Image: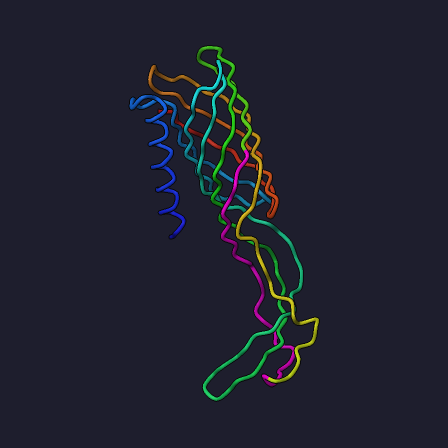
Amino acid sequence: MNKFSLIVKVLGIIGLLNLNVFGGTPHKSFSVWGGTDLSNNKVNSSFYFETYFPLFQSTDLKLSVGIYNTYSSHFYTVNTYKNVHIDDYNKIHLVSYQVNGTNYTVIPFGLGVSHTLNFGVFNPYLSVDINYSLIDPETIKTSDEVKGVLELNENIPDEYKKMGVLPASSLGVNFAVGSKFEIYSNLILGVRYQFNIRKEIVNSHQLLVGIYF
């Protein structure tokens, strides 16, 4: 299952939950957000879909799913090995390469609460989410440099037994502050600053603009 079909299925489940909770009548508490992810001085894209269920006065339970790209700048050397099979050539290559950073595509599934202060047209709010994220990492690295060649039955030196393992998922927390602006009776726009804390990858800052419908 690719990441886009997964998001579509999750959106469908969230929509059905919303309809069931509110007795089959669509509850106008959906929002769609888009913006930028700012990490290590690199700008990437962000997208979120959210729906809300009233808990208390001015406080909502929030379900969300999104997709965003973020970047981690780090520099280190990896020594590893590769089995090379080309026609009759069967050898083990000891290789080394330099990692210069990692791009991450992150799909967060969130559960949180949002509290809004109602002042009419201008409505500031705070929200906190816990989430589980699927991660698709892409390492930015130099070309492999062959440091040695071994026969298949030779022992690999310990310093070349490291295999680059990147995270496939992560737990995290989002903290957000923003405001809703009532433009017309049925049109509410939102702006938000969001700070994402991830256990397995770089934390990131996001600036988002949304629409409620």
User: Which one is nearer the viewer's eye here, 166 or 71?
Assistant: 166
Q: Position of residue 150 (x, y in %)?
A: 62, 83
User: Looking at the picture, how far across and down is residue 183, in whole percent?
Assistant: 38, 17
Asked if residue 145 is among those painted magenta in the image, a careful observer would answer yes
Q: Nearer the viewer, residue 153 or 196?
A: 153
- Tell me: residue 131, above or below residue 73: above
**Would you identify the image quadrant in which residue 9 lies?**
top left
Say above or below: 206 vs 159: above
> Where is residue 24, by image quadrant?
top left
Chain part drawn in magenta: 130-152
Total marks placed:
0
Left or right: where 85 falls relative to 9: right
Q: Of all residues shown, which one is farthest toward the left?
A: 24
Residue drawn at 49 percent across, 81 percent down: 85
Q: In the visual, does 124 lie left or right of 185?
A: right
Q: Is residue 138 above or below residue 179?
A: below
- Residue 33 placement (x, y as % from top left): 43, 33
Residue at the spot 53% in from the left edge and 49% down from the top edge: 169
Q: Return the residue nearer the eye: 171 or 81.
A: 171
The residue lying furthest to the right in this view is 158
Query: Farthest top residue?
Result: 120
Q: Main secondary structure of the magenta part?
A: strand
Question: Is 213 included in the stretch rendered in magenta?
Answer: no
Q: Position of residue 128 (x, y in %)?
A: 55, 29
Figure quadrant of the C terminus: top left
Query: Image height check: is 177 above or below 146?
Result: above
Residue for point 36% across, 24% down: 21
Colour mode? rainbow
